[in-house]
Image (tube, helix red, strand yellow):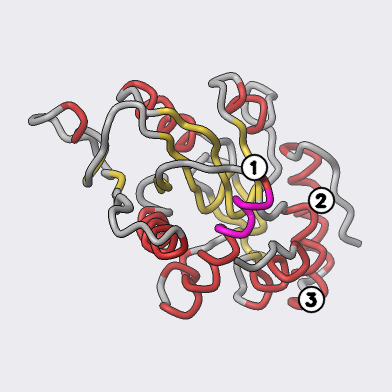
């Protein structure tokens, strides 16, 4: 297996326009109005890109010493990614019985309780790594963790492809909020590192950069200077 290379991963995100800027700010799912974006959708839409992305995730997991029975994608943004990760994990482990588990976008209201949040061969006490595409306030991630814990699944860790590095409305960082559920959160990429790289490539206007700095003054875990 390849080693995880942070600089190479950051370049992969920037080259594929995962990080960018808005001339006219938009409202995020969280309700916050943002002049910049982190969007991993295109990475999940092409075989070549998701192949590279899964290699990065597997290398990152190995570097952090995180092991589990399978990956579980936060619905719906990382559902496809988790399936490919589990397939590759089975190949790497020479395990033809590797579970190909899919997270349901909405809980199933009837049938076996273990099928409420899962499609696939799930057992109680399974050990799971949750994968999320973009982490903002962590609300969807935390809901997913709670659902799996309710199903008597052990969540050993959560991994975000990109952490927007924002405080939640309660003032907590995502790492702390997730940690309160006895789960460790790891970010493969952080916005405070990625935004300066995106600035150098995309060259947004000074007014846009000023809006991004103001956004981090209001919501960021730390201030960000781009000018």
Residue 127 lies, in percent from the top left, at 42, 35
Callout 1 secondary element: strand
Q: Closer to the N terminus: mark 1 or mark 2?
A: 1
* Dot placed on the residue nearer the N-terminal end, 2 or 3: 3
Closest to the observer, 87 or 183:
87
Query: How far apart are the two marked residues, 1 and 2, measured between alpha carbons?
Result: 24 Å
Would you say the magenta stretch is mainly helix, strand or loop?
Answer: helix
Q: Which residue is mark 1?
A: 186
Pointer 2: what residue? Answer: 213
Residue 174 on the magenta segment = no
- Residue 80 visible somewhere in the drawing: no
Point out residue 218 in the picture as x, y percentages from the top left corner.
75, 37
Could you tell me which residue is drawn at 76 percent across and 72 percent down? 204
Q: Which quadrant does the C terminus fall into? A: bottom right
Q: In the rendered image, is residue 175 in sight?
A: yes
Q: Is residue 50 above or below residue 214?
A: below
Q: Which of the 4 image quarters holds residue 184? A: top right
First to last magenta residue range: 58-63
- Give the quadrant of the N terminus: bottom right
How much space separates mark 2 and mark 3, taking CA atoms? 15 Å
Disc 3: which residue = 203
Marks 3 and 1, how far apart in space? 29 Å
- Is residue 63 found left or right of 123 in the rendered image? right
Q: Residues within 10 Å of mark 3 (few under 14, many from 20)?
A: some
Relative height, residue 146 to residue 204 (above, below): above
- The residue under the point 83% across, 39% down is 222
Q: Name the element at disc 2.
A: helix
Q: Is residue 120 left or right of residue 183?
A: left
Label 3 secondary element: loop
**Picture layout, residue 77 above or below residue 221:** below
Q: Which residue corresponds to the image point at 33% horizontal and 53% vertical from the top-left?
A: 98
């Amino acid at each position: 297996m390849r080693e995880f290379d942070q600089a190479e991963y950051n370049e992969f995100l920037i080259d594929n326009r995962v990080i960018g800027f808005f001339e006219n700010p938009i409202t995020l799912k969280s309700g916050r109005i943002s002049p910049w974006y982190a969007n991993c959708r295109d990475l999940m839409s092409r075989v070549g890109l998701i192949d590279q992305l899964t290699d990065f995730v597997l290398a990152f997991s190995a570097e952090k010493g995180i092991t589990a029975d399978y990956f579980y994608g936060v619905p719906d943004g990382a559902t496809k990614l988790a399936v490919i990760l589990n397939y590759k994990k089975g190949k790497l482990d020479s395990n033809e019985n590797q579970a190909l588990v899919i997270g349901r976008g909405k809980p199933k209201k009837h049938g076996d309780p273990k099928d409420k949040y899962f499609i696939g061969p799930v057992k109680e006490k399974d050990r799971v790594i949750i994968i999320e595409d973009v982490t903002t306030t962590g609300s969807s991630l935390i809901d997913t963790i709670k659902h799996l814990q309710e199903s008597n699944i052990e969540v050993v860790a959560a991994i975000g492809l990109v952490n927007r590095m924002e405080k939640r409305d309660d003032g907590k960082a995502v790492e702390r909020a997730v940690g309160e559920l006895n789960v460790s959160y790891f970010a493969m990429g952080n916005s405070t590192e990625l935004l300066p790289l995106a600035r150098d490539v995309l060259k947004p206007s000074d007014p846009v950069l000023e809006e991004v700095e103001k956004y981090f003054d209001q919501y960021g875990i730390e201030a960000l200077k781009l000018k």
